Amino acid sequence: MHFIHRNLFCQFYHSEIFEEDYLSVDDEYSQESTSDEIPRKERYLLTQAYDFSVSELVNKVAKEDIILTPEYQRGYVWDNKKASLLIESLLLNVPIPVIYMSEEKDGTWSVVDGLQRLYSLQRFFNNELKLIGLDVLQELNGLLHDDL
């Protein structure tokens, strides 16, 4: 029986940026203004690392604490083989890249980088992804999460 218990390292960003001299690199953009623009003196960047298990991340997605589809994100494009290889990597304890998120004003987190990985995990945990094309754990090909 295989269990996914790996922790994924997540980096969260608040959406403001520290005011520094280098922020005025391109003044042509600072000339443009929108109604929701944050004044320069109020901008800051706060980063914080969290270490969540895969199941914790999937639960946060299910509870909509993590938003997979912010406006700026492309849709889900991974095929089943690529998603399956991610699951295989987790089962083999292969390091997975950091997932980056931004904390929104309402306290939810929007995915900045890691949508394909998180959505693949959600599909697998919801039994919507049957493992295919596994290279090392070939005996798991054709199985769903609940079959493990």
Image (tube, rainbow, N blue to C red):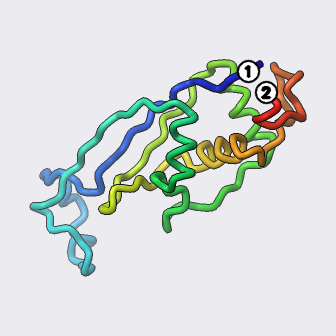
For image coordinates 17% across by 51% down, the residue present is: 18
Q: Position of residue 124 (x, y in %)?
A: 72, 41
Residue 133 horizontal side relative to residue 55, left or right? right
Q: Position of residue 96 (x, y in %)?
A: 57, 29
How many numbered callouts? 2
120 to 23, vertically: above or below: above
69 to 51, vertically: above or below: below
Which residue is under mark 1? 2
Q: Earlier in the sequence, mark 2 or mark 1?
A: 1
Q: Disc 1 residue type?
A: His
147 to 80, vertically: above or below: above
Image quadrant where one finds the C terminus: top right
Circle 1 sits in a helix, a strand or a loop, which is it?
Answer: loop
Q: Position of residue 122 (x, y in %)?
A: 65, 46
Q: Position of residue 139 (x, y in %)?
A: 89, 22
For image coordinates 51% across by 53% down, the residue present is: 63
Question: Are the residues at dot 2 and dot 1 in contact (C-beta closer than 8 Å)?
Answer: yes
Q: Nearer the viewer, residue 58 or 16?
A: 58
The image quarter in which residue 140 lies: top right
Residue 73: numbered disc = none
User: Mark 2, residues whose alpha carbon is within 10 Å: few (<14), some, or many (≥20)?
Assistant: few
Q: Disc 2 residue type?
A: Leu
User: Mark 1, residues whose alpha carbon is within 10 Å: few (<14), some, or many (≥20)?
Assistant: few
Residue 107 horizontal side relative to residue 130, left or right? left
Circle 2 sits in a helix, a strand or a loop, which is it?
Answer: loop
Residue 50 horizontal side relative to residue 32, left or right? right
134 to 35, vertically: above or below: above
Which residue is under mark 2? 148
Task: Estimate the spatial distance between the alpha carbons at disc 2 and disc 1, rounded to whole Å.
Answer: 6 Å
Image quadrant where one finds the N terminus: top right
For image coordinates 65% across by 26% down, the residue present is: 4
